Image (cartoon, grey):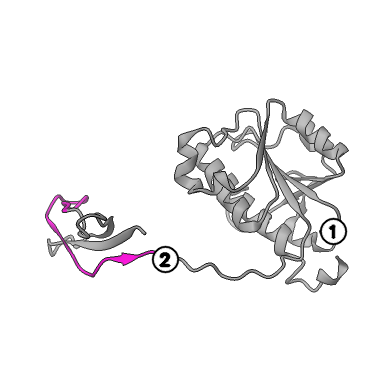
Amino acid sequence: MTQFQIRQCTRHDCRFRFPVTVDPASQTATEIDCPKCGAPTQPVDAPYANDKERIASPDPGGPEVEALLDNVRSTYNVGSMFRTADGAGLRRLHLCGVTPTPGNPKIVKTALGAEGAVPWSYYRNGLDAVLSLKDQGLRLWALESTPRAHSLLEIIPELAGPRLLLVVGNELSGVDPGILQACEKVVAIPMQGHKRSLNVAIAFGIAAYFLRFGLLYSGYHGLI
């Protein structure tokens, strides 16, 4: 198990504090100068393990969910989405167009093993994939801010039903218009600030957990 240690800069006018990895052979942290000012640092606590506890999850109560990532460019966004898909219990990710696949080593940096736990498929053409999945009986919901969109927080009564496909699109251009037209519903996350949208991986995380767990905590879970 990986262990860590907190080090702190010895300069009184800096005192930069940060974690470093403990060498498993010597059980000591690597000597390192302060990344901010270059002065020596010293350990301030004993080594520790970041041993996260897995919180027991109830039955989510919501529908089975898969997701389609159409032309999502960033490997870091895709890696984060794999990790979210694993945590929320999504059945599969469908990767389309320029969306990188787990063969890209950069995905590992943010997926942290989830890329091997979540089933995935790749398609060159996102619209072909969407139409095929629609023929298989999946409900198609796109996550996009358009005049047609409904607030994600207002669609709880409609969650109950067959398997659902959450569609997210490119970081800049959004969901392909042809794919949007094929979707039966478009949902968006309400925004309070000046920006009109969130980072695609953040938005995906909010939507994935809401679709899976929204019914459980809404009073509508008896519908399924």
At horizontal 72% and vertical 60% (from top left) the residue drawn is 212
> To which residue does mark 2 refer?
51
Quadrant of residue 20 within the rendered picture: bottom left
Instruction: Mark yes or no: residue 220 visible.
Output: no
> To which residue does mark 1 refer?
158
Horizontal arrangement in the rendering, residue 100 relative to residue 96 (left or right): left
User: Earlier along the polypeptide chain: callout 2 or callout 1?
Assistant: 2
Q: Residues within 10 Å of mark 1 (few under 14, many from 20)?
A: few
- Whether residue 183 is in magenta: the answer is no
- State which region is magenta: 31-51
Q: Position of residue 73 (x, y in %)?
A: 56, 33
Quarter in which the N terminus is drawn: bottom left
Of residues 67 and 121, which is closer to you in this image?
121
The three-letter code of the residue at mark 1 reads Glu
- Whether residue 36 is in magenta: the answer is yes
Q: Is residue 26 above or below residue 145?
A: below
